[in-house]
Amino acid sequence: HRDRDIIKQQSETQVELERANKEIAFQLQTAKRQQELIVEQRKIDIRAKEQEVLVQQQEVKRREQEQEAAQVVPAKMAADAVAATADGEKRKLIITAEGEKERAILVAEGERERLSRTAAGEAERIRQEGTAEADIIRLKGEAQAYAIKATGLAEAEAMRAKAEAWEQYGRAAVTQLIVEKLPEIVANAAKS
């Protein structure tokens, strides 16, 4: 009887261990998929931001051509300086935000690895991994929110500075420029 009880207990322990291993594997696979989804969303966000920057660059180029056609050289130089400063600030904030985001991701992933190694094979490991994954998602979200906020602030500052530079030209110069460049603008729009 005693040997049979020992064998039965060993069998139950093995079944419980296999169940725990399957649960851990499922948790790890879920966490991996969540990370992949976050990476894919970030790629989509980057592509959208690149398109937005391209549109802004085309708008800046169009405005620069209008300024040069009106031969408002001092105002153009001032606008270029303001735009360059604003764009530099924007790039600096974006780079800082991206660096913070990457650092937060690395810290969170390191923490998850540490918890996975120290809690291997125990039920506590499942709880700790859940907490680590939640922290990873939270830290990634915070880092992404910081990057988006910094990008938005930098772009808003760049647009405000450019708008101020445009105010210096005066309405008469802009109206004259539009009248002179209207045929070219229409022709370019038709080509697009």
Image: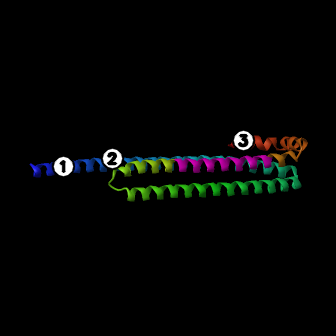
Q: Earlier in the sequence, mark 1 or mark 2?
A: 1
For the C terminus, the quadrant is: top right
**What secondary structure is found at the residue carrying circle 2?**
helix
Q: Which residue is mark 1?
A: 9
SS for callout 1? helix
Instruction: Tell me if label 3 and label 2 are in contact, CB under 8 Å.
Output: no
Task: Locate residue 89, reporting x and y percent.
Answer: 72, 56
Q: How far apart are the alpha carbons under marks 3 and 2?
A: 60 Å
What's the magenta region? Answer: 138-162
Q: Secondary structure at mark 3?
A: helix
Q: CA distance from mark 3 to mark 1?
A: 81 Å
Task: Tell me: residue 114, above or below residue 179.
Answer: below
Q: Which numbered disc covers residue 189?
A: 3
Amino acid at pointer 3 = Ala
Image location (x, y in percent) of residue 159: 75, 47
Task: Name the N-terminal-most of marks 3 and 2.
Answer: 2
Q: Amino acid at mark 1?
A: Gln
- Residue at mark 2: 23
Residue 36 shows in the view: no
